[in-house]
Image: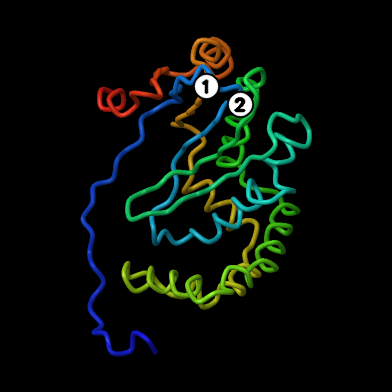
């Protein structure tokens, strides 16, 4: 009702070039010698807004790293105690966004944790998830959906995306139905086709001097870049 009198125009067409990811695995260390917990990020290829299998990939990612019983949480926290928490996000934007896995292990286990994250991310991109994991993720999403639409602003924002970006409204209108009907074979096929288990950037915030050797041995990267936390903008401009 609040917007009924506003004119309805065509969705804006964006002409943005897509930045292609570099080949191979690369390390960037933001040098913070005072840190004992090492902020860790593993970045790889994500999605563009409007990619057809987007919802199915989000369901798979929820199984992989979006809940306490997820593969990431069980391997990183429950089995090995590398970190208190770990999350995975497959982002979408007008141009292709990134899939990111983030956690903060202790300095003494940072290299082992990073190697395991890289292995798990590659397995996810290449194989998808198990039927049991998908079933648990679907139940979690269906039970939690009420909290995603409980306020007016949470209901409005997806609609603004539909109108401003010209996206189909079906994902929001039929969300519960689409989640219930998601099939394992189709979900995993979309994961394999749209995500990548290679060409990744591993980012660490910690003591570069003590981290570089163990990380290089654990990950065998194609390159290592050291950035100083107090001059990071200038350092990035030279990369």
Q: Earlier in the sequence, mark 2 or mark 1?
A: 2
What secondary structure is found at the residue carrying circle 1?
A: strand
Image vertical order of residue 72 relative to residue 53, above or below: above
Residue name at image x 56 percent, y 12 percent: 217
Q: Is residue 165 left or right of residue 35?
A: left
Q: Quadrant of residue 73?
A: top right
In the rendered image, residue 5, in percent from the top left (x then y), is placed at: 28, 89
Residue name at image x 70 percent, y 68 percent: 143
Residue name at image x 66 percent, y 66 percent: 144
- C-alpha gap between disc 2 and disc 1: 7 Å
Give the colour scheme shown.
Answer: rainbow
In the rendered image, residue 188, in percent from the top left (x then y), is placed at: 59, 51
In the rendered image, residue 54, in percent from the top left (x then y), is placed at: 48, 58
In this rendered view, identify the residue nearer to me: 73 or 122: 73
**What crowding class fits label 2: few (fewer than 14 Cα within 10 Å), some (14-19), or many (20 or more)?**
some
- Residue on which disc 2 sits: 37
Q: Which label is found at residue 194? A: none
Q: Quadrant of residue 222?
A: top left
**What crowding class fits label 1: few (fewer than 14 Cα within 10 Å), some (14-19), or many (20 or more)?**
many
Residue name at image x 30 percent, y 29 percent: 233
In the rendered image, residue 129, in percent from the top left (x then y), is placed at: 66, 48
Q: Quadrant of residue 231?
A: top left
Question: Contact (CB < 8 A) between labels 2 and 1?
Answer: yes
In this rendered view, identify the residue nearer to me: 184 or 143: 143
What secondary structure is found at the residue carrying circle 2?
A: loop
Task: Say which quadrant the N terminus sits in.
Answer: bottom left
Image vertical order of residue 197 relative to residue 37, above or below: below
- Residue on which disc 1 sits: 206
Q: Is residue 59 left or right of residue 199?
A: right
């Amino acid at each position: 009702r609040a917007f009924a009198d506003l004119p309805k125009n065509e969705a804006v067409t964006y002409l943005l070039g897509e930045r292609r990811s570099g080949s191979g695995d690369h390390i960037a260390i933001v040098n913070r010698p005072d840190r004992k917990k090492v902020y860790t990020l593993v970045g790889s290829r994500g999605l563009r807004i409007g990619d057809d299998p987007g919802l199915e990939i989000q369901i798979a990612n929820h199984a992989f790293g979006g809940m306490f019983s997820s593969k990431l949480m069980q391997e990183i926290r429950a089995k090995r105690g590398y970190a208190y928490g770990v999350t995975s996000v497959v982002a979408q934007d007008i141009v292709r966004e990134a899939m990111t896995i983030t956690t903060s292990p202790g300095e003494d286990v940072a290299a082992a944790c990073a190697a395991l994250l890289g292995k798990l991310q590659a397995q996810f991109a290449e194989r998808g998830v198990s039927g049991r994991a998908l079933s648990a993720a679907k139940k979690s999403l269906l039970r939690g959906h009420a909290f995603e639409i409980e306020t007016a602003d949470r209901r409005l924002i997806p609609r603004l995306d539909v109108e401003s970006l010209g996206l189909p409204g079906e994902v929001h209108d039929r969300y519960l139905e689409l989640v219930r009907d998601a099939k394992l074979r189709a979900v995993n096929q979309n994961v394999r086709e749209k995500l990548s288990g290679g060409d990744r950037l591993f980012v660490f915030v910690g003591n570069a001097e003590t981290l570089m050797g163990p990380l290089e041995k654990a990950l065998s990267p194609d390159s290592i870049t050291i950035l100083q936390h107090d001059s990071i903008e200038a350092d990035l401009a030279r990369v």
